[in-house]
Amino acid sequence: MTETTQQVRARRRRSLFVGGVLALVAVGLVSATSGAMNISIAEVWGALRGGADLDPTIRSVLVDIRFPRVVLGMLVGASMAASGAVLQGSFANPLAEPGIIGVTAGSAVGAVIYIVSGAAVLGTFGLSAAALFGGMAAIALVYTSSRRSGRTDIVTLVLTGIAVNAFAGAIIGLLSYLASDAQLRGIVFWTLGSLAQASWSDVVLVTIMGGGGIALAWSIGRALDVVSLGEVQAQHLGIPVERIRIISLFAAALAAAGATAVAGQILFVGLVIPHAVRMLIGPSHRALILGSALVGAVLVALADVVARTIVAPAELPLGVLTALVGAPVFFRQIRKSRLGEAT
């Protein structure tokens, strides 16, 4: 008997989630054992179960450095990928992504202003609040600028996002010029993106903000299924399109700002991963958001392993690595979209 499209997608969803969880465990083990100090899987297991016979130095390296970095990489990847999935569904635009429409840049500006102002003594949670405010301000500007006759103009949305990114880059450049040496090091961290300073407090922060954003996005997943078909159709079916878009914008900004606050600008994750997951399991947004979060967690954690081993003992900035991979995919998607319009 030939499988229906729904049956094929359901089977692929099961395979994706089972395979994703297994891949997450495997990447976590590889990440925990990789680094300047050679650590075996047995020692990782000993640290996880709290074995008393484990060398104190190895325990400290794992518990205080590597474990938080592994978990944080997964949370950042999940947050950015889910953010991209909800934005693409909300605007029915395959080019919508936290970095492209200005959310990531706005969050980075908020964080940089926070650093240069000297308010950094308030700690990580103050920094995350500044990043969230910057991301929300940027996405509000992009959204209001792209509205025309009660509808969202997609071309204007992307172009405004590009302008916001350019303006944010100029502000960061100006603040970098005015910053002290210590502040400049922090700014460089935000612009390049890295998990090198991961801590358990960062993990808590992204769990709250990223988890909250993903949960909020999942809650409107069924409405996004209708909105992605078009505004007119959604309104005829009684879907409050503008309210759903505002909720999706807040969810995306919450998740992306939390990730940016602790890891800096990690670009293109929210663009590439939802595309790949959508092609595999279909456009149902509840499954798409969770699947994107899972795949994003795996790939960013894996990218972090590559970033800190490919040029060892130095470390390649994670944001640079994701941009090197994601930018060609973005160019390909633009070309595909233009060819689709031409036909």
Image (spheres, grey):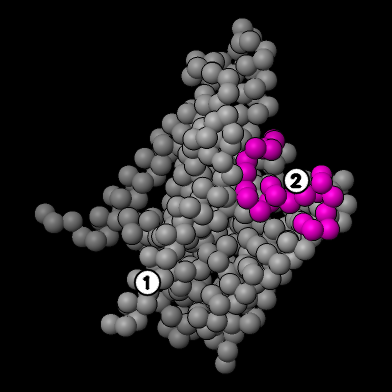
Left-right relation of 212 to 12: right
Residue extending furthest toward the bottom: 149
In the rendered structure, the answer to whether residue 11 lies left or right of residue 143 reads left
| Horizontal and vertical percent position of residue 209 | 66, 52
Residue 1 x/y as whole percent: 11, 54
Callout 1 secondary element: helix
Magenta stretch: helix, strand or loop mostly: helix
Of marks 2 and 1, the one in the foreground = 2
Residue at the spot of label 2: 185
Front-most of residues 126 and 313: 313
Q: Residue 46 vs residue 204: left or right?
A: left
Q: What element carries label 2?
A: helix
Amino acid tagged 2: Arg
Residue 50 in which image quadrant: top right
**In the displayed structure, would residue 341 be above or below residue 279?**
below
197 in the magenta segment = yes
Read off the magenta span: 176-200
Answer yes or no: is residue 238 visible: no
